[in-house]
Image (spheres, rainbow, N blue to C red):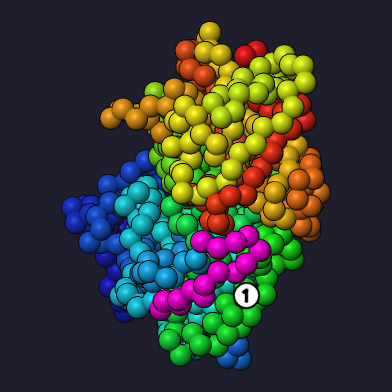
Amino acid sequence: MIKREPKSYWALATLLIFFVLVAKGQMAEKAGPIIENGEAQVVEAFSDPSKWIRHDLWVETEFDSDGDGELDRMHVDVTRPEQTESEGLKLPVIYESSPYYAGTAGLGKGIFWDVQHELGELGKPRKHPSVTRIGERPIISNSQVRTWVPRGYIVVHSSSPGTGLSDGAPTVGGDNESLAPKAVIDWLNGRAKGYTERNGDKEVKAYWSTGKVGMTGTSYNGTIPLAAATTGVDGLEAIIPIAPNTSYYHYYRSNGLVRSPGGYLGEDIDVLYDFIHSGDESKRARNNKVVRDTEMKNGQDRITGDYNDFWAGRDYLNDMKPMKAALLMSHGFNDWNVMPEHSYRIYKKAKEMGLPVQIFYHQNGHGGPPPISMMNRWFTRYLYGVENGVENEPRVWIVRENDKKDNPTPYEDYPNPNAKDVQLYLSSGAPAKGELTINKPKKQGTETLVDNYSFSGSSLAKAETTEHRLLYTTAPLKEDVHISGVAKIKIKLSSSKPAANLSVWLVSLPWTEALNTKITDNIITRGWADPQNHSSLTESEPLVPNKFYEMEFELMPDDQIIPKGQQIGLMIFSSDKEFTLWPKPGTELTVDLDGTVLTLPIVGGKL
């Protein structure tokens, strides 16, 4: 017979065990996210990097972009709090993908396209650099981890196709660059397979993921969240693209004109392909032949600069119908690399689709995320499902010219709803300065400029007289003028040759070069166009010399307050030394002043 102890004995023993466990911390409250004021807070239990679990794996996709007969696998790393293992904690994911993690090609001489040649010619052949892959396993990148892991998120990175240890071929905006992050999100939701090795069959499960994913990143890394979102993948709840390239045509062309991104004269899509191609060396020759030397060579068309099927397939505006992720965008109005039109066109479409959308604009150049609190509230709302009201807040936040980036001004929308179009007309004045007025003057006739790429745009704007540009200015402003939206120019012109560059700058004068000059002090906005595309972006036609043509195009979006006392100047010239091709000087552009008008969106509608 088994001897049974009295119930009081077992009660006492249980109590003693309880106190022992408490003393050892084994019955302590489990760690979890802390949400205050609608934001995920830093949690001490998640904040020790030495206790983070870090590992990598390969996620199998649905495509074979390197043509080896096997589905491409993407290299993925994971950084997560130890409690996702020790306590079975499940958390949402912040995900960033990039083609840059494994290194890039050096910017040596000859890798960019030669720009010193006549329009309609190709120029000298360019060199093709190779990338020496860098990086170590298991961690692809440390970006995002110190910001989001302590706040109760898991951080995931992946190398995009054909880069690093990911299979595939880089396509610079092709379908595989959308489907690759989709596969990673599918894996985080249990719908795709992950493996411990690139060619192995041992599976890895994302048992620690809630399936809720947010993506962010800057520039190319900001393009990929939008690319993923256009697939409509379930689980991608929110994205925060920062200065994203949303159309490679708009990045490398402008209204039919071959135009480089600021700071990278002569870059084109095949240059970027070479710059990022850090994947498997044994696959590079095949990728080069199929992607760079066939698809890109046949499609990018540096001769005409026309919009075609190749470019349409790399324009994410065309793919937005399936998108359902909440969208917070960030961009600088003075970003002359990935120009502000890239974000504005997507913001506008997302708003039309009824998606949750906000946009943060600042006055600086390339990059620049929203304030961390804004990002935190966005992710907390859509990844944790906390009803913090972000969807009811103002859609637009703009950092004013003299404010800090963490102190943006809220607006109902962009462009400012109080902005009204004001038309400005030209009065003659070449080779000095003409006038820009709201009253249309009597017949002004024509004025002519002579193209010469050797003069920079800034030098032309500062010149008192020059034959290489036409400049028309307002009277000194009697009060501050707030421009908000997209300026447009309708221009009637002729060319002495069958092809010509056309560049337009809107400037604030007098031009200043003081030590404390701000990026907003001189250039208001800019635009470029090919007069051969006066009728259509998809088809150019040689100009009949000295015949007048009308064309209308937009300048880059802007929101800027021009101070009292300054003058707004419209500068028309031909080749822009920093952005366009450099044909032999001498082409004459003649502008019909009576057939030309500048439209400015001005808050209050008065100049």
For the point 61% across and 39% down, the residue is 449
Residue 72 in the image, given as x and y percentages of width and height: 56, 81
Q: Quadrant of residue 382?
A: top right
400 or 26, which lies in front? Answer: 400
Label 1 neighbour load within 10 Å: few <14, some 14-19, many 20+? some
Q: Is residue 405 left or right of residue 350?
A: left
Main SS of the magenta segment? loop
- Write down the quadrant of residue 127 in the picture: bottom left
In the picture shown, does residue 260 fall above or below 475? Answer: below
Q: Position of residue 155 (x, y in %)?
A: 41, 59
Task: Examine the rendered structure and indicate whether residue 31 appears above or below residue 134.
Answer: above
> What amino acid type should be assigned to the residue bearing mark 1?
Lys
Is disc 1 placed on a helix, strand or loop?
helix
Q: Is residue 26 magenta?
A: no
Q: Is residue 111 left or right of residue 190?
A: left
Query: With respect to residue 158, does 496 lie above or below?
Result: above
Q: Which one is in front, 71 or 468?
A: 468
- Look at 64% across and 80% down and name the residue there: 294
| Residue at x 61%, y 91% (from the top left corner) | 69
Provide the residue designation for mark 1: 297
Image quadrant holding the N terminus, namely: bottom left
Specify the segment rendered in magenta. 116-130
Instruction: Tell me where residue 66 sits by quadrant.
Output: bottom right
Say which of 527 and 130 sits in front: 527
Q: Left or right: where does residue 207 sit relative to residue 10?
A: right
Magenta stretch: includes residue 122? yes
The answer, for residue 3, to whether it is visible in the render is: yes
Number of numbered markers: 1
Q: Residue at x 50, y 29 (%)?
A: 465
Q: Is residue 272 visible?
A: no
Q: Residue 284 in the image: state x and y as whole percent.
A: 49, 85
